[in-house]
Amino acid sequence: METTLFLSVIILYFLVLLGVAFFTSKNATNHSFFIGNKSSHWALVAFGMIGTSLSGVTFVSVPGTVELAKFSYFQVVLGYFIGYFVVAFVLLPLYYKLKLTSIYNYLGQRFGIFSYKTGSLFFIVSRTLGATLRLYLVINVLQIFVLDQLHISFEVTTLIILLMIVLYTFKGGVKTIVWTDTLQTFFMLLALVVCVFYIMGDLNLSFSETLGKLNDSGHLQIFNFNFFDKKYFLKQVLGGAFITIAMTGLDQEMMQKNISVKTLGGAQKNMLLFSSVMVLVNFLFLFLGGVLFMYAESKGLTVKGDDLFPTVALTHMPMLISLIFIIGLISALFPSADGAITALTSSFCIDILGVQRKKNWSENKQSNIRKVVHLSFAFLFLMMVYYFKQLDNKSIIGILLDIAGYTYGPLLGLFAFGILTKLQIHDRLSPIVCFVAPTICYFFQNYVPAYFGWSYQIGIELLLINGLLTFFGLWLIKKD
């Protein structure tokens, strides 16, 4: 009975998304698919971006880290806040000044076609890996707690979910995503708040009393002052700042929504509102992790990590709360993929295929090519999620940060070199630099400390190291 009800809620939720897509995609064109006709309201974009940035990883994984890592993740969140200001006042003015549809076109204007294609390629690889990992995490939770009991296989679940996403993003693109992400963010935050207050009520604790107990147990600890540890505060803050600059400011998916706002001022207001709310929401997710830990301890539960929140929500809470959790979970699921597939389609069409430069291609021909690319990325997502299921990884958030370090590092180096210097480079050598830098990082992270017996561990600062290596490599290939 419960699983049937859960499935009914999921279907109803999807029908609502289809309804939103139907109304927002009327008279949609390629221009509205790529940048929403530059008519998106800044406040709407800001609220919807919260759901895209949080995704299933924050919703499931962040609360599960509190038992072992305490509140140390908040160091990264403080770094995020700093990074958003760089995006708002350095990168957004540049994108609006150049009237970009794809942000990687800046690299083409600044350095040449090879840098342009390389930047776009790194985004495509990074976003594909990151989005499919997030998608896998949430689908796996739904599978274990709901769909296995209905004897629906993981493969069928993934196929149906991706078909749903294709159906409501296929025509409207960004114009639709702005509205569906807003709806999904609302339900995700609703689930967060409801679950926090229910557990505190069950434990007979107020907000201040909960903070006191977490502080007494040591779980409220935020700052880590051990220089050699991966969670050393300076690493975490700087790493968080540069992750935001790279994964928001240099990411076509995130910037595609920002530049769909009509004016630069509106886009900047969007970013400032978004950054402030994100700090509060991430703290609430950590707070949720703390109350989940106390709840599990009081009930004698041994479940840990990514399984903690779903287990408590679906097996130890009233039906209504469980339903709200399911809605929040699928609200975390869809932004993991819908915006990513749309942004990847845009980037591949504009940056790799150059559809907007084909003056002899009709609107209809461009639209047909876009649809083929859109379906191709949906199929690639399907195959990648199947692959991750075979690996059955538990530490998704750690894998995501590593992917960001390796793939966004070259983007960070390229954009930094373009903005901070006036030097020109030998453009044909740019791809070599961008592939060599992460290769050096990989060997340094995985082999050098062990070989020399160093106690220093490379963590979140991998992105910064990779970006600096790329920057230095570009300086080596500068023109005289």
Image (cartoon, rainbow, N blue to C red):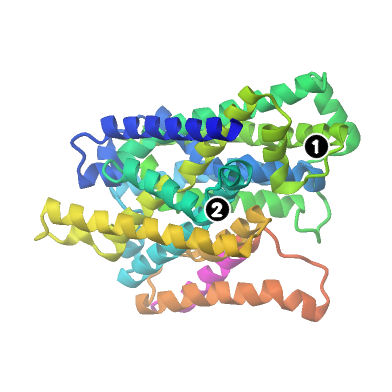
Please identify the quarter of the rendering in which residue 325 is found. top right
Tell me which secondary structure the magenta stretch mostly adopts: helix
Which numbered dot is residue 406? none
Element class at badge 2: helix
Q: CA distance from mark 1 to mark 2?
A: 24 Å
Near-viewer residue (340 or 323): 323
Classify 41 as above or below 401. above
User: In the rendered view, does 390 fall on the left or right side of 343?
Assistant: right
Which numbered dot is residue 136? 2
> The C terminus lies in which quarter of the figure?
bottom left
Near-viewer residue (234 or 141): 141
- Percent x, y of residue 64: 72, 44
The three-letter code of the residue at mark 1 reads Phe
The three-letter code of the residue at mark 2 reads Tyr
Per the image, the residue denoted by label 1 is 293
Element class at badge 1: helix
Magenta region: which residues? 464-480
- Percent x, y of residue 416: 48, 60
